[in-house]
Amino acid sequence: MDAKTRCAWSLKTDKYIDYHDKEWGVPVRDDRGQFEFLTLEAAQAGLSWLTILNKREGYRRCFAEFDPVKVAGFTEKDVERLLLDPSIVRNRKKIESTISNARCFLEVAAKHGSFSNFIWGFTGGETVQNKWRSLTQIPTSTPLSDTISKELKKLGFKFLGTTVVYAHMQATGLVNDHLADCFRHSELKSVH
């Protein structure tokens, strides 16, 4: 491994390092990317992120490359098929919520021009730049994630409580939660 300073959580595995260095905190402005992370973050509830990263390709295959239009059309037959697929988390409620969330996602996108417009509207279209010095300072939720979670629930989304929403905000660059001394923090300050 190189000598770059990274967020300590990423040092556990090569997969985490790769995810940290290339994806985590990069602003996601396209709807398919937003839907992918909403799906994966909701699937993670109660599990480790490494479990989800290890199953990510399975999720891509099983959920039509995260095309919300295709996923919104899934039926009970698809649910039964997915419950037999070990490449994803085989939890009926999580699978069903992914399908119903796709339908809600499309409704929001239709109303706001895109889901991305909707979610980025909560931060005025800009990444919230935090300057945490240690992992213990990083919250698991914030008043903003509370607000977004409540709004998503009102719109019919499931498995998107405030902690899951905050993880989504971190992953998709709504907030820059790389530690201040991490090489990615300064790199992502200038990315929009």
Image (cartoon, rainbow, N blue to C red):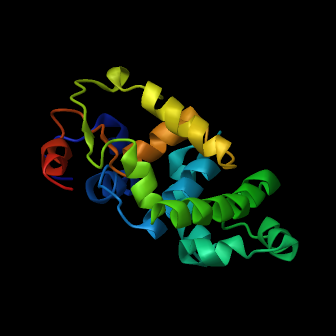
User: Which of the pair 81/108 is nearer the observer?
Assistant: 108
Q: In which quarter of the view is residue 131 placed?
A: top left
Q: Where is residue 116 in the image (x, y as percent from the top left)?
A: 42, 59
Whether 81 is drawn above or below 5: the answer is below
The image shows residue 126, relative to residue 64, as above or below, that is above
In this view, 60 is above or below 42? below
Q: Position of residue 171 (x, y in %)?
A: 40, 49
* Camera-side residue of 124 and 134: 124
Q: Using residue 177 as the reference point, say whether residue 35 is left or right of it.
A: right
Q: Quadrant of the C terminus?
A: bottom left
Extreme residue toward the front, this view: 111
Q: In this view, does 24 lie to the left or right of 83?
A: left
Q: Is residue 47 visible?
A: no
Residue 70, x across and y down, in percent:
65, 78
Front residue of 92/71: it is 71
Q: Tell me which residue sits at (57%, 52%) in the image.
A: 51
Percent x, y of residue 84: 81, 69
Lateral position of residue 4 relative to residue 138, left or right: left
Residue 65 visible, this angle: yes
Q: Nearer the viewer, residue 142 or 177?
A: 142
Q: In which quarter of the image is residue 8?
A: top left
For image coordinates 30% across by 37% down, the residue present is 177
Is residue 100 left or right of 116 when viewed as pictured?
Answer: right
Residue drawn at 27 percent across, 44 percent down: 127
Residue drawn where x is 21% and y is 53% of the image: 1
Report the number of numbered marks: 0
